[in-house]
Amino acid sequence: MSTALKPTRRIITVDDDEGKSVAIADGPTPDVRTDPARPGYTSERIWVASSSPHRIGAFHDTATQPHTIEPPRGGSVCRIVTFPPENSYRGKVGAAEVQAFFAAMGSPQASTYAPNAPHPYMQKTRTLDFCLVLEGEITLVLDTAEVHLKAGDTVVQRGTNHAWSNRSDRPCRIAFSLHDGAP
């Protein structure tokens, strides 16, 4: 039995020429990233706002902008990430795999990989992140503690060093809303 989750459905709405709200997109996002070192990992970028407040005017699909983990300066990004169970890759991932992942995500500087770190995918960004566990279970790994989370739990991540560790036997899906932060 496959434990893969179906792609996230993304609906985009706008006002038409008469000022009536309409849905102009209904389907998966065009920006899905994977990690070859973690089979089953997906990062689905839903939307990018280049500023706050975001201009609502003319529509263009922001998910086609250059990919990075962090939002643009002064902006935000929404993504859905599926974390596979770690038993398939834990102990097989080292510096090269982690470096390749963060480079492919457009954010090599976000990695805080160290051989003695509590998790190989430790990362730190200058962002305020709102995280909502949608499905499954996961452990938030910090420098000095670990927090077990289940579907419905939320995390407010304030620019700290962290990683997400799925120690269960099923995928875990989390919605992330990242906002540019200042030190």
Image: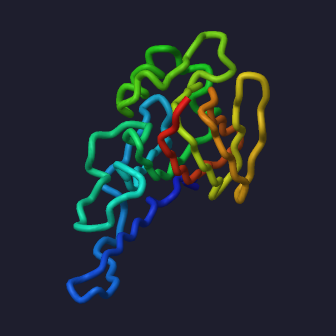
65 w.r.t. 23: above or below: above
The quarter of the image holding the N terminus is bottom right
Query: On the rendered structure, is 11 left or right of 58?
Result: right
For this rendering, which residue is in front, 100 or 92?
Answer: 100
Whether residue 18 sits left or right of residue 108 in the image: it is: left
Residue 171 location in percent, x, y? 60, 48
Q: Position of residue 111 (x, y in %)?
A: 50, 22
Q: Quadrant of residue 35?
A: top left
> Residue 76 at x, y = what percent?
44, 48
22 or 34, which lies in front? 22
Q: How is the image coloured?
A: rainbow
Question: Residue 51 at x, y = what percent?
Answer: 37, 50
Q: Which residue appears at 43% of the width and 49% of the height?
A: 77
Residue 58 falls in image quadrant: bottom left
71 to 1, vertically: above or below:
above
Task: Residue at 35% x, 31% y: name it.
Answer: 106
Q: Is residue 11 above or below residue 134?
A: below
Toward the viewer: 24 or 97?
24
